[in-house]
Amino acid sequence: MSGETTLIILVGILSIAGLFILTAVLIYSSMAPTRIRERISRYVETVPEMPGTTQLILKRREVVSGYRSKLNEFMGRFASKSLNLRLQSSNWQITVTEFIMIQIGAALLGLLLIWLISGSIIIGVIAAILFYLLPGFFLQQSIFRRQRKFQNQLVDVLVLIRGAVQAGFSLLQSMDVIVREMPAPAGEEFARVQREVQLGIPLGQSLENLSDRMESDDLKMVVTAIVINSQVGGNLSLMLTAVTETIRNRIALLGEVRSLTSYARYASNLLTLLPFLTALIVTLLSPGYFSEAVRSPIVIVLFIIALLGIILGNIWLRRLAHIEV
């Protein structure tokens, strides 16, 4: 066994041992009685006796919950409001601390795995950076899909709210109709608005929080109209009718703009993929064509500069085809 392989195995063992010790400490601390539990127990009725299996399951859940709270408390210093907002937008049922731990765990896994496979620490570090960025990529994709789905539901949501208001319901009661009738994500988001209002947050602030999570210009217009209507008064049903018609016109105009700019988008994608397709075809026809080129550091630097130029060109073409509606 070589010295480099021994070092890799030693690093892996130390990492696993460190995680095990940290987990054991947090679990032990979570099982200890706390002042909060003691104060709650004074006002909560004693839980009746349950079968042994049920008590064991509840005890395990309590240990896991305590471990999770201790972990969040320990890693809370690394949390940020922007990341918390992104997790809320994606509706991932994890905390900011747990997401950071997933990123760190993915980076360690990528480092050890690629280091063992390739035998190079530099490649392992590059893989660790890529593995660290993967959870953020998946989070952003989840946010994009959820926001787009909410945007597609917005007109139906406004139609339901307007119908409920015309039937004599208040705005909060009409949101209850949305929670019952609309699927996710609209139903989930308005249920969150209701919970925030029940906790004492003003309705306008709860709607602004919803607008921040969904990042929709149409929703911001709706929230602004509702807030102004609540402050100055007026016919809410008539206002919702006007806003709904405006959003429908914007959607129609946006569809027309996308159809007119489709050629520019397809051209940008084709121009971006063309160098890679050409390199693939050349490699298939002549496998040793690039073998000498990749051995020269100057050629590698030129390849990196060309790759950056392709990426910047794609971004520039997309910006030219992007028109605000």
Image (spheres, rainbow, N blue to C red):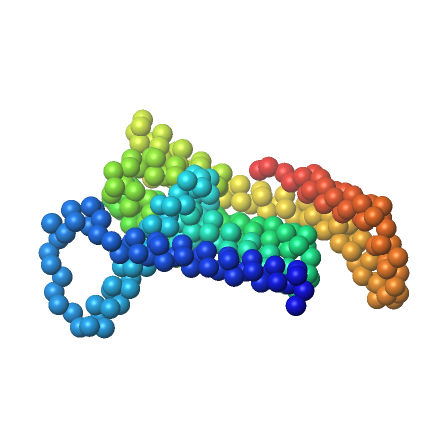
* Residue 22 or residue 310, whichever sits in front: 22
Name the spot of residue 40 as percent of width and height, x first: 16, 49
Q: Is residue 317 above or below residue 46?
A: above
Instruction: Please provide percent x and percent y for residue 287.
Output: 86, 65
Residue 196 appears anywhere in the view: yes
Left or right position of 70 against 200: right
4 versus 165 height, above or below:
below
Residue plotted at (44% across, 36% down): 221
Left or right, 59 with reference to 249? left
* Residue placed most toward the observer, 104 or 7: 7
- Write the residue at 65% across / 48% down: 259
Which quarter of the rendered picture does the C terminus lie within? top right
Compared across the picture, whether 191 is left or right of 184 comes to left
Q: Is residue 195 left or right of residue 297?
A: left
- Residue drawn at x 72%, y 41% is 312
Q: Residue at x 80, y 45 (%)?
A: 301
Question: Which quarter shows the N terminus?
Answer: bottom right
Could you say where residue 222 lies in the image, as x and y percent from the top left?
41, 38
Q: Nearer the viewer, residue 221 or 169?
A: 221
The answer to whether one can see residue 137 in this image is no
Picture quadrant of residue 118: bottom right
Q: Is 284 above or below relative to 88? A: below
Q: Give whichever of 24, 274 is nearer the camera.
A: 24
Count of marks placed on residues: 0
Residue 165, horizontal then vertical, whole percent? 29, 43
Q: Does 116 sit above or below residue 147? A: below
